Amino acid sequence: MFSVIVVPDGSRGPDSQIRLEPGETLRFGRTRSEEQAAGPPFLVMNHAGVSRSAGEITATATFWTLTNLSGRQTYVVENPEGAGEHIKVGPGRVEAPVPFEFSRVVLPAGSDLVGFDVWAPRHDYLEDHAGTGGEPTALPFPLDRSKRYFLVLAALCEPRLRGEPHAPLPTTEQVVERLKPAWPAVNRTTVQWNIDYLAVKLRLKPPAESALPGPRLNGKKESLVSLALRFDLVREEELEVIEEPVR
């Protein structure tokens, strides 16, 4: 089971994403040498300002590490949902741990900044059993209610949670309008991106290497809402997150 998904800039879907299982490594840089051709996967970053062999990431079960192979440049890993939260990985740093569920790896390249995204959808959370003793139990569907994907899931579930069990699901445009007060920058693309990510995180979408076709957008929405309501992943009292401004 993959634990990390690398999304190159310009990616148009699962076929152009790179999935890594725990222990697997992805090297990135401007060109792939003949010696590397038979080695681990390689992400080509076609910019003259990027080192030929710039760095590598290694997947673990629930997070990933970044190695900076540059002798001069510091790399930055941003948390797009963290209000400026980031970590710096200095030249030559080996296997710096990255704790973010969503990350943007940024490399200085001449006068430009280039990079790629990394998803870690297997971030796990524990049930609250304070005072009961024993080992905590990992949640089967680990959702972080502070993330924007939870806003999208709540908006999709809202009509049926408000007492209309057979209500049609909101369209993408309706989700955008519903989330505008809490998330002014939301648009059709970001909603569709989060729906796609939820399908991966909740394991509704087959991996890219599978021969099985993934569900179309409408099918994904219906599957997500059905799963969320069946297992109480979103409750009516949690719909208030739609009204709260995104951090």
Image (tube, grey):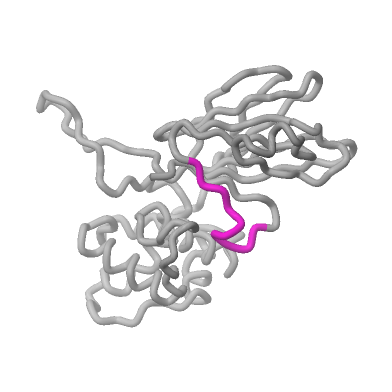
Which is more toward the observer, 42 or 162? Answer: 42
- Location of residue 38 by image quarter: top right
Residue appearing at x 22%, y 57% in the figure: 232
The residue closer to the viewer here, 207 or 138, is 207
Identify the residue shown where x is 25% and y is 58%. Answer: 235
- Give above or below for 66 relative to 114: above
**How many discs appear?**
0
Rendered residue at 45%/74% (across/down): 216
Residue 164: give x, y in percent of width and height: 24, 78
116 shown above or below 14 = above
Which segment did they paint magenta? 11-20
Give the residue drawn at x 58%, y 39%: 79
Is 89 situated left or right of 125 in this image? right
Location of residue 222 in the rendering, given as x and y in whole percent from the top left corner: 34, 73
- Foreground pick, 242 / 89: 89
Quarter of the view holding residue 50: top right
x and y percentages locating residue 226 in the rendered image: 27, 68
The quadrant of the picture occupied by the N terminus is: top left
Q: Is residue 239 above or below residue 53?
A: below
- Whether residue 146 sits left or right of residue 231 in the image: it is right
Give residue 149's position: percent from left, percent from top.
Answer: 45, 55
Q: Nearer the viewer, residue 46 or 88?
A: 46
Would you say residue 77 sits in the magenta stretch? no
